[in-house]
Image (tube, rainbow, N blue to C red):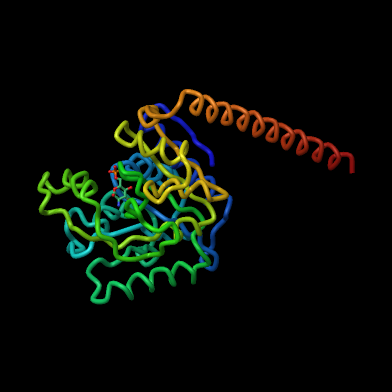
Amino acid sequence: MRLIIREDPTTVGDYIANYICKRINEFEPTPQRPFVLGLPTGSSPIPTYKSLIALVKEKKLSFKNVVTFNMDEYVGLPRDHPESYHTFMFREFFSHIDIPPSQVNILDGNAEDLISECKTYENRIKEYGGIELFLGGIGEDGHIAFNEPGSSLASRTRIKTLAYDTILANARFFNNDISAVPRMALTVGVATVLDSREVVVVVTGQRKALALSKAIEDGVNHLWTLSALQLHPWALIVVDEDATAELHVKTVKYFKSIERVQDEVERTQALLKARGKIAEKQVGSLE
Ligand SMILES: N[C@@H]1[C@@H](O)[C@H](O)[C@@H](COP(=O)(O)O)O[C@@H]1O
């Protein structure tokens, strides 16, 4: 697992957006072979979405051949409710980029048969060959998507009853009216996230600090479902300084040193590649 620390939520968003942009462009998606991207809601990914929108406007990135799968959706909230995740995603992201709406997948929390909705969602992900990169956010109790404490680490897309702490935390989006917050949600499971080829998680703010320390300094534990990322071969967590408040100083120093060494390796590789190209050109001009 890699941990990248940036100054504040804006620089975290810029880092993740550039990272995703690079991955999509390197993948060279086509209509036959789209890039499959998992996406979260919440306030934490908003700076990332803003930065991705800017990259699309600057023509550095296109979502024409990207297929998305959202992590979760409330049960019973009308689709056009201002706080449904469907409304959130179009308001904050999809309406501002060039993705065809037919390539957007969001769980339907109003489906007649919620169990079959969840099964179909898992199958649709499989039909696309799995998720290439899952971007996630976390709750204060360390939940990823809506995988509340105690969720099975082998869980799949399903109906989940929300923890009272999550209902309290999300009341801010419902005029602080706790009774207006839905009690249930549909969510991808921990195993659905772990199945993705790459997972990137955004964690910002001091209120997430305990969850971050539990997830990376303690062992794998279903009470902090983000900790399951320790089992993933390609996981990256991008955080701001505030979110590191509960980490040991040595943990922060360790991950910063890894980033420095990684940068050095990448600079050297770029230099060697550039020299190789120069050499190739010289050979070419002698021929
Ligand atoms: N189901 C969502 C999570 O997927 C999200 O990560 C979390 C964090 O929200 P915020 O970023 O606003 O703190 O909110 C909800 O619980």
Q: Position of residue 216 (x, y in %)?
A: 47, 39
Residue at the image position 20 percent from the left and 53 percent from the top = 83
Q: Nearer the viewer, residue 164 or 111?
A: 164
Displayed quadrant of residue 79: bottom left
As displayed, is residue 41 above or below residue 108?
above
As displayed, is residue 55 above or below residue 123?
above
Residue at the image position 50 percent from the left and 42 percent from the top = 236
Q: Quadrant of the N terminus?
A: top right
Displayed quadrant of residue 70: bottom left
How many discs appear?
A: 0
Q: Nearer the viewer, residue 7 or 92?
A: 7
As displayed, is residue 143 above or below residue 126?
above
Q: Position of residue 273 (x, y in %)?
A: 73, 37
Q: Nearer the viewer, residue 167 or 204?
A: 167
Residue 16 horizontal side relative to residue 22, left or right? left
Q: Quadrant of the C terminus?
A: top right
